[in-house]
């Protein structure tokens, strides 16, 4: 029985190599499976798949998958009912003291490196999901995405909403879904940004650089209207430059929890 290959075009979306020079046997999870997602892609060669999931102790590097998983694991564990006891939270990369509201990196990892790897992971997720949804579409317009996620070239923006209220689903499987609908594509074409709504967080990836620059003023206005719940002046759109500002433990949210139409509202 032939071993299953995860291919559609047979050309890797990352390194652009084809069979027989590369193989496609390893399952290309779009979102790390450890978060509970079974969403898989195609046309990610085994070598690139290995690259995205591998850390190196010698060079103190954090893999894309680990950065994504640890940040959103913290988000998932902080959604819903707040802990009644202020127990510390420990991940593979950091410790969080709930009493002091302080996060500390483990070992000698760099905060800048962690932040950049998380951003690269977001772009990795985007391109894999886009290709899985539209496998016959040419990806040349996302060349900046490919170079940043796979080869660490460039610095496309990641913006996020600093809300004090959030909406999220009562079922976890919906909180970790990556949307790539026709509306999401229309948003990309208008603004140059992909809107990722994940674990109640609104993130915006600059996937079409020129489009975003040409339409910058209108794009930022549309991004704000699509994501910000304007409780006060602290609720705004920010550029992600420090992962600690991402508020993965939702410490800025109002303390009261309400339920409405199958969603939690903090």
Image: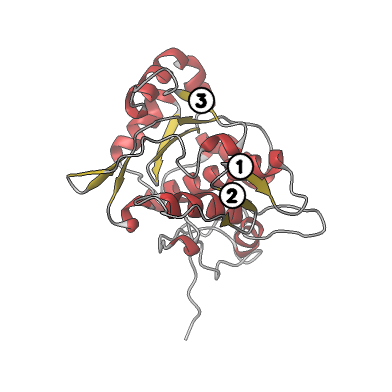
- Distance between the alpha carbons at the discs numbered 3 and 1: 21 Å
Q: How far apart, in angstroms, are the residues tagged by discs 3 and 2?
A: 23 Å
Q: Are marks 3 and 1 in contact (CB under 8 Å)?
A: no
Please tell me whether residue 154 is drawn above or below residue 22 in the rendered image: above
Give SS at disc 3: strand
Q: How many marks?
A: 3
Quick one: label 3 or label 1, which is nearer the N terminus?
Answer: 1
Task: Determine contact: label 1, label 2, CB under 8 Å.
Answer: yes
Helix, strand or loop for disc 2: strand
| Nearest-to-viewer mark from 3 and 2 | 2
Q: Position of residue 237 (x, y in %)?
A: 46, 24
Q: Nearer the viewer, residue 253 or 46?
A: 253
Please give the name of the residue rendered at 65% of the width and 54% of the height, measured from the top-left corner: 93
Query: Left or right: 50 with respect to 170?
Result: right
In percent of width and height, residue 138 lies at 47, 42
Q: Nearer the viewer, residue 49 or 96?
A: 96
- Which residue has dot 2 on it? 96
Spot occupied by residue 38 in the image (x, y as percentages of width and height): 40, 64
The residue that mark 1 highlights is 102
The numbered mark, 3 or 2, whose residue comes first in the sequence reads 2
Residue found at x 39% / y 15%: 218
First along the sequence among labels 1 and 2: 2
Residue drawn at (31%, 45%), measured in percent from left and top?
168
State which quarter of the image contains the C terminus.
top left
Image x and y of residue 82, in percent: 39, 50
Most extreme residue toward the right is 58
Q: Residues within 10 Å of mark 2 (few under 14, many from 20)?
A: some
Residue under pointer 3: 238
Picture quarter containing residue 20? bottom right
């Amino acid at each position: 029985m032939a071993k299953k290959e995860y291919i559609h075009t047979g050309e890797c979306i990352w390194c652009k190599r084809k069979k027989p020079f590369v193989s496609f046997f390893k399952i290309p999870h779009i979102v790390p499976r450890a978060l509970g997602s079974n969403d898989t892609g195609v046309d990610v060669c085994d070598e690139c798949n290995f690259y995205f999931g591998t850390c190196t102790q010698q060079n103190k590097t954090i893999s894309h998958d680990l950065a994504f998983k640890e940040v959103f694991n913290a988000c998932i564990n902080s959604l819903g009912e707040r802990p009644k006891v202020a127990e510390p939270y420990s991940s593979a990369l950091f410790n969080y003291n709930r009493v002091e509201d302080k996060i500390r990196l483990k070992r000698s990892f760099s905060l800048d490196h962690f932040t950049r790897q998380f951003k690269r992971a977001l772009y990795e997720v985007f391109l894999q999901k886009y290709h899985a949804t539209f496998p016959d579409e040419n990806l040349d317009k996302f060349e900046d995405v490919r170079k940043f996620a796979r080869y660490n070239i460039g610095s496309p923006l990641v913006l996020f909403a600093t809300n004090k209220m959030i909406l999220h689903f009562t079922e976890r499987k919906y909180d970790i879904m990556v949307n790539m609908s026709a509306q999401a594509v229309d948003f990309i074409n208008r603004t140059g940004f992909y809107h990722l709504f994940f674990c109640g967080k609104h993130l915006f990836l600059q996937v079409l650089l020129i489009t975003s620059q040409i339409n910058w003023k209108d794009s930022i206005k549309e991004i704000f209207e699509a994501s910000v719940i304007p409780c006060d002046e602290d609720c705004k759109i920010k550029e992600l430059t420090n992962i600690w500002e991402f508020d993965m433990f939702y410490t800025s949210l109002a303390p009261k929890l309400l339920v409405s139409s199958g969603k939690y509202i903090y």
